[in-house]
Image (cartoon, rainbow, N blue to C red):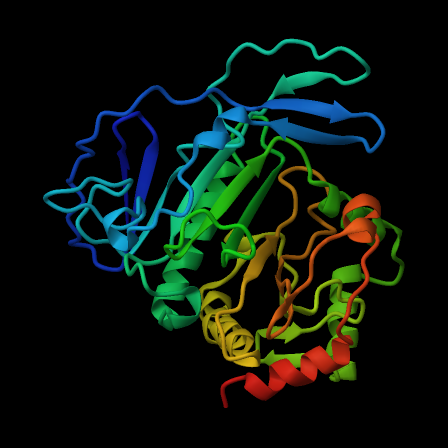
Amino acid sequence: MKRTITHLADGRELIYFDRRDDADRSAIDRRTLGPRPVASELRYDPLTEEWVAIAGHRQTRTFLPTGGTAECPLCPSSDTRSTEIPAYDYDVVVFENRFPSFSTNFGAYGEPGGLSEVRPGVGRCEVVCFTSDHDSSFSKLSDSQVELVMEAWADRTAELSQIDGVEQVFCFENRGEEIGITLAHPHGQIYAYPYVTPRTKLQLAAAGRHTGGNLFADVLAAEREAGTRVVASNELWTAFVPAAARWPFEVHLYPHRQVPDLAALTEEERAAFAPLYTSVLRAFDGLFDLVMPYIAAWHQAPVRQGRELGYLHMELFSIRRAANKLKFLAGSESAMGAFVNDVLPEEAARLIRSQIDH
């Protein structure tokens, strides 16, 4: 693998990840761009003990351009058009988000009054382009391309963890307009948070109270033994629907070995993940014979705290509950955080298994 660092016209970093060592990455960004926005403002909610990022500049980000590849900022550049990627072709590209929720470009921050405190939204937000093919999807990537994406995830996890003030690194993909994507090109994002996220705090607290072994490992072992909700597995990974799934179709993918983050996976583990994961994605699309909206979220141990308790895993879920129905987060879920699932997890597992490649 070849890794090449360059910069865009406004100073943002861009990194090419190539399979070929002779890939030419000398192209420069020909655009004239305005100044980069300052980091968001973090405000503390004393009632939930959570931080909320206020990032008004994100209101101006590109939203679902209608011209296909002719307007897509994630497609390669050409002789007549410059995009976020200066090269005329690429394998995998990572670059700093032009409209970040977190960054190291600080501004001036006032006090909002009340009981909330304010601090800069230190961190970093990056875009990961999985392929130069605008009309592709993660499920269509070759095993070697998935491995290259995983190399990029691991590289960025390790590097972003070194930024002063970063407490957790989150790699994820949003897919589908129903989920709320703003660009259709196959891509994901990476957030380097200046705090440990609420969901991770809850999981690590539960793991800390658990006796007899690692909680995540015990959940995995119990699901593998029961087998009723396992949808696919190989020697190094297992994919299963959790017993208390919140979403109509939800699959968790665990490596069989406890590791804290993507950077700790071996080459063999990364290679084994690729065919298993893409088969589950294709199964999602096969459920209703349509493009399934989903969120794919990597849960990694925080940078400093709870690393001995953390267990890398992916949560993949869709808001589609039937061919013509979506699950909306209404009163109970949005206001109270109390989920009600319309699909029995065992039935969801059976349906997903029926679509897995054999």
Q: Which of 154 and 212 is in front in this view?
A: 154
Q: Where is residue 240 drawn, in percent x and y? A: 67, 74
User: Up-down: is 141 above or below 174?
Assistant: below
Location of the N terminus (image quadrant):
bottom left
Q: Nearer the viewer, residue 342 or 149?
A: 342
The reply, left or right, for residue 56 in relation to residue 347 is left
Q: Which residue lies furthest to the left in this view?
A: 79
The residue under the point 52% across, 60% down is 265
The reply, left or right, for residue 261 in relation to residue 83 is right
Q: Residue furthest bottom?
A: 358
User: Up-down: is 264 above or below 191?
Assistant: below
Q: Nearer the viewer, residue 154 or 268?
A: 154
Query: Is residue 64 something that shows in the picture?
Result: yes
State how many labels appear. Answer: 0
Q: Where is residue 15 drawn, in percent x and y? A: 32, 42
Q: Where is residue 247 drawn, in percent x and y? A: 71, 64
User: Up-down: is 8 above or below 270?
Assistant: above
Query: Is residue 234 something that shows in the picture?
Result: no
Q: Nearer the viewer, residue 21 or 6?
A: 6
Q: Where is residue 60 drawn, in percent x and y? A: 44, 31
The residue under the point 14% across, 47% down is 78
The residue under the point 51% across, 13% down is 107
Q: Residue 192 occupies which quadrant of the picture?
A: top right
Q: Residue 305 occupies which quadrant of the picture?
A: top right
